Amino acid sequence: MATETIPNSALGGASGDAAEPAITLDGAVPRTLGTWDQVAFWANLGVSLLGPVTALYILFPTTDAPQLSLLAAFTALVVGSVIGTLMVAISAVPGADTGAPAMVLLRGLFGVKLSYLPTVLNLLQCLGWGVFELVVIASGAQLLLPWDVHWPYVIAAGVLSTLMAIRPLGAVRVLRKYALSAVVLASIYLFVQLLRHPLPSLTHGTWSGFWTSTDVLIALSVSWVPLAADYSRHSKSARSSFIATLSGYATTQIAYVALGLLAFSTVVSTDAHDPQTDIFKAFIAVPVGWIAFAVLVARELDQSFANVYSTATSTQNLLPRVDRRLLAVIIGTTATLLGLVVQINDYAKFLSLIGSVFVPLSAVLAADYFLLGGRRGWNVSEEARTRWIALLPWLVGVATYQLIAPGDIAYWSDMWRGVASFLHWSSPTWMSASLASFAVAGLVTLLVGPLMRRSAGRAIAVPTSGSSSGSISGSSSGSSSGSTSRSLSVSGSDEG
């Protein structure tokens, strides 16, 4: 199979290994990932030990709400997963078109300097989730292995995640070749074992809180929105990245939260003091269940690897000429050290809050890129002008989300409840914060679209037909007076 790459720019970035991303932002972008590579990658990301634990928050969307019926919970699971993953898949397309990573893409929306704001938020999110995943892996390993210690498992998981982040495309290919088959077999086995127990009535319970539960699933998916283009930029076509992301991630997220719904409905008490430990023990307790659980613990490494790699890639929007491998080592080491000392459960609420700001951001990006003509001229160069007007729809979308679902961080939620009281606003129980904020942010983007386009400055043409490969190239030209100018051309893939 031929390896397609985006040539180096004139800034001198070395491409390094042609089968891996260049070491700096200026270097070559390999186009080596086919549809099945990406399906396997996103399917593995959808398989998470956090999925079964999340099922408890689907059954009980709020602490004072009655339990959802299984029918309502399964419906919320499918609806929320499909909607959330659709946002991720849409966010993957610009990366496949332009070959630019996710945070660099936001230069076309906000301009270079202003793109640093979402970049910093994404760094906090990715690093936090990376730490979270290391703690989950260590917790699973503690239950699985006879040595009741924590720190060696955190360190081992951190080292492996960092090594995978240094050679990310190789890791994706290994996941496709080996990991997915093992995960499918382990998953089928656990489903069969749980389905041997009698299920309660599917209609026993309520539909109250349905949209709150749906929002949990949307948020679980949307946490990958600011990472999607980091991988789709290596796709052979925009269409394959969209299809692979949507089908791969949605399918396995549905499967693994469903696994948790079955477990909490059959063998694990919903009143458990530590639902994560109890559900892990339930998986291990089935006949030879430790083998299936071991596969899932080992597979969790792809979550931590993806977060480490995307943190490094996001950092390159701030430091474009720093070696991504060095950044991966620094970030992997930092995540490992934090995993040893941080009470990550206290940070989980903050991660959820940060994730919520990317729902309206994905709407602003989609509306500008697909509906306002941005796809024909998306400027990801270092000359992209600041577009302050683009903050308006994003901030309005964030405000909409917080007025409906202000979260559980005391000072933050109290502030937004105060704002809601001042506005005499009380959100209906049927309203989804994710859908409302996405719709409002998208609508405001369309309304201020003419102002956004005028503030974009000189655009860079991004053809959307003809070639199945993308290219980014820079050129320098000098005049007789010795001055130089730098230009960047981008061609993206969207064949068929």
Image: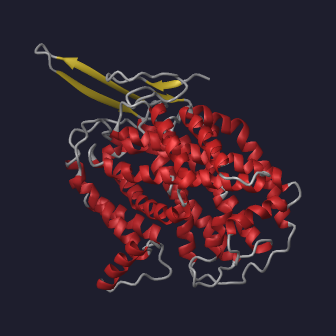
Judging depth in this view, the residue of 15 and 379 nearest the camera is 15
Q: How is the image coloured?
A: secondary structure
Rendered location of residue 282, percent (x, y): 79, 64
The answer to whether residue 192 is left or right of residue 391 is right
The answer to whether residue 453 is left or right of residue 57 is left
For the question of whether residue 257 can be seen, the reply is no
Judging depth in this view, the residue of 242 and 406 nearest the camera is 406
For the question of whether residue 281 can be seen, the reply is yes
Rendered location of residue 198, percent (x, y): 85, 74
Quadrant of the rendered structure where residue 458 is? top left
Q: In the image, what residue occupies the spot 31% across and 44% down?
A: 108
The answer to whether 384 is drawn above or below residue 283 in the figure is above
Rendered location of residue 176, percent (x, y): 68, 38
Q: How many marks?
A: 0
Q: Quadrant of the N terminus?
A: top right
Q: In the image, what residue occupies the spot 34% across and 64% down?
A: 443
Rendered location of residue 162, percent (x, y): 56, 38
Judging depth in this view, the residue of 262 and 465 nearest the camera is 262
The answer to whether 5 is drawn above or below residue 307 in the figure is above
Q: In the image, what residue occupies the spot 73% across and 37% down?
A: 178
The answer to whether residue 441 is left or right of residue 45 is left
Judging depth in this view, the residue of 79 and 328 nearest the camera is 328
Q: Residue furthest top?
A: 480
Q: Residue furthest left?
A: 481
